[in-house]
Amino acid sequence: MLFLKFFDVFFCMRQKTSPTEKMAAKQAEDAKPQPNKSKFYATLHENARRYLKSTRDPTANLANIAALIYHEWRSVYGVNSMNWCGFYLARPVLNTVATSAAAAGSGGAGAAATTKHDPNPDYKHSRILVLGPFHGLPAVTLIPYEKGVCGTGAVQETTQLIPDVHAHPNHIACDSASQSEIVVPVFVSASSGDGKAPTNTTTTTNKKVFYGVLDIDSPVKNGFSDEDRVGMEQLMTIVSEATDLNADAMVCTARC
């Protein structure tokens, strides 16, 4: 009996992993060859096209794409390689002003009250980013155009590849664990809906109207590369061509 107890204690002690062993295991994990990015994006794009076939609805398609990126990336590169993935959508910032029935009555007895939208003076830009479909921890709901990586991407309408988010001015963390980030613009393509530009937007890039951004965070520094920029930009083109994106569909009022 005494021998068995001694064996159990000895066995348990051997099962404990020392700091040196943990470091060696991490180095071995880091030394593993990374999956080929070209192959990853070829598969991701193929799967995206499959999920985008059934509907052109923007809510359904953006939700599925956010889920697809989040789960496929983590299944290939590890659960600690991505911690947030989702969309922020550009919306006009407007004040809602209710016109009283009495004032409206000048047009005739019984005239109904109306609602008009005026530009909101509280924001520097006439548009704001509103949280869309995503995977990860609950996130900031509204992002002004000039704030953080997403706001910078909205102003410049270009992909933002940030190796260290803490070095970026006014960084807004969807998850406090985030260390690096990539933000990719989404445009309304000519094949989206009726192919016409939204009437509430004049900003265009290569005849494409800005719709929002894809925002992806990683809990490690340098989590994304230029290959990811190219692959995600191509994916957003696939999404916009298969989805009826319409920036006129919603507005962000003072209470949105």
Image: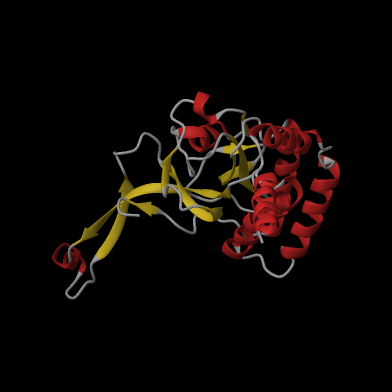
How far from the left and from the top, in percent, is residue 216?
60, 43
User: In the image as oriented, which residue stretches furthest toward the bottom?
Assistant: 110
Q: Residue at the spot x=44%, y=32% of the render?
A: 146
Q: Is residue 222 above or below residue 90?
A: above
Residue 215 placement (x, y as % from top left):
58, 43
Q: Nearer the viewer, residue 131 or 7?
A: 7
User: How far across and down, in percent of the image, does residue 101 sit?
Assistant: 17, 67
Q: Is residue 191 visible?
A: no
Q: What is the x, y in percent for residue 111?
A: 22, 72
For the N terminus, the image quarter is bottom right
Towards the viewer: 185 or 174? 174
Name above or below for residue 242 compared with residue 22.
below
Q: Residue furthest left?
A: 102
Which quarter of the figure has residue 77? top right
Query: Can you see residue 29?
Result: yes
Position of 186 with respect to 250 (left or right) is right
Q: Up-down: is 208 above or below 136?
A: above
Count of residue discs: 0
**In this figure, which colouring scheme has been used for the structure?**
secondary structure
Residue 46 quadrant:
bottom right
Q: Residue at x 71, y 43 (%)?
A: 232
Q: Where, quadrant-wise, is the C terminus in this rendering?
A: bottom left
Residue drawn at 59 percent across, 56 percent down: 245
